[in-house]
Amino acid sequence: MRKLMLIAGISVVSALFVSCGFFESRTAVLWTDRPEFAVYADYFNAAQNQYKIETRYLPSPAQALSKAVPGEFPDIVVGSWLKSASTRSLFASLDSMFRNGNIQESSFYPALLAPGRIEGKQYLLPVSFNIPAVIFSRENSGLVDNPFVLSISEIQELGKAYNIERNGVYSRMGFSPSWNDEFLYVLADLLKANFREGSPLAWDPAALEQAVAYIQNWIQNANTSIQAEDDFVFKYFFDPPAKLATSGRILFGYMKSSNLFTLPEEVRSNLDFRWVSNRNTIPLAEGTVYYGIHKKSKSKGAARAFAQWFFTEETQRFILESSRKNRMNENYFGVGNGFSALRTVTEQIYPQFYPLLLGHMPPQDYLTPPNILPRDWLTLKDRVILPYLNDRIRSDSPASIRSLERRIGEWYRLNPVR
């Protein structure tokens, strides 16, 4: 008996030595800004007894990485904004997992893999993504011909045709880009403003000016003026967009896919939707979630085992089933609060859990990831970019508005720690 136990013990030690290196810890620390990954880690821990994942939630893992000292590094990082130049250099190459067949490269959306590469090597694996959508009442589905997308020009034309106005006062308004700050940014993105990581931020000034002019023309052509839109909002926008759409007060409302598919079922069942597009392009929302293994990880075996477990159809179907069973799907959409980066999971499995997707899957060739953005992008966007866009569309005189360059400079002077 003792001999058998000794042989078994030697086998386990040998396996550990070969698979993950002698003296490696069997416990990996996971940093993430996605709360649901604590649940996924528990599923992994319960599914096997060789490794353990310990999860630590951080509002911004990317910024925490920049401040971490030796001995405090995580083994795994799952989150947004990991692709910036100062962050992506901290990760180990994952190419061996493709070569060994542990993870199938062909399973992923190719456009999502590309931002995780550096000089041809894969350092980050995409987890989940979201897409901008316009929602509308099912009663108005007959107004929309394309089952997949609505171009920004179609949104403008259909919205204008839906309006009811008398003596300059609107009792019904189809849509306005001014109703949602995020939609303003989506328009700027679709019109090639090209925000990207720079020193600290770069963009195409001419394209941004053209985007502002496009939005101003939209407002004036469709809804008379920004004042008329503001008056309409003041009078009627006590309800959320979904209720305004189903009541007939507006034609379209804007929301991300993660917001759409976490609406209560009784609300969602009365809605239809299309993906926002322009010239065969659907812009993915910023904040696409990626998976990386820290290059100084002391638990690479556990980190790779978790990745190998997570990036499979079987596991992600289990996650979707469990989320429905324990009602996590009321707060988190799909896997990682978005569409799965695994193509077959999104295209074949998601519609089984989200029937509204049937016949409306986004065309793969349209999906366009955002540029690599600085790790403090969310704060910069909320505090600087969106207020600038709001100010610009409301002013006919660019000279009277503080320039974007000046605003960014002032913001970083007041917030020097990045």
Image (cartoon, helix red, strand yellow):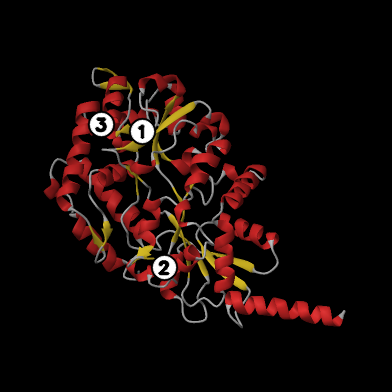
Q: Residues within 10 Å of mark 3 (few under 14, many from 20)?
A: few
Which one is in front in this view, the residue at disc 2 or the one at disc 3?
3
Looking at the image, residue 387 sits to the left or right of residue 302; the answer is: left
The answer to which image quadrant residue 282 occupies is top left
Residue 141 located left or right of residue 43: left
Residue farthest to the top, as pictured: 166
Mark 1 lies on a secondary structure that is strand
Residue shown at the point (41%, 73%) measured from the top left: 90
Q: Which residue is mark 3?
A: 153
Identity of the amino acid at label 3? Ser
Mark 2 / mark 3, whichever is N-terminal: 2
Q: Earlier in the sequence, mark 2 or mark 1?
A: 2
- In space, the residues marked 2 and 1 are separated at their CA atoms by 35 Å
Secondary structure of the residue carrying numbered label 2: helix
User: Residue 148's x, y, as percent?
Assistant: 39, 32
What residue is rendered at 17% in x and 50% in y? Answer: 401
Amino acid type, residue under disc 1 in the picture:
Val
Residue tagged by mark 2?
A: 63
The residue to which callout 1 is attached is: 149
Residue at 42 percent of width and 53 percent of height: 288
Which amino acid type is shown beneath numbered disc 2?
A: Gln
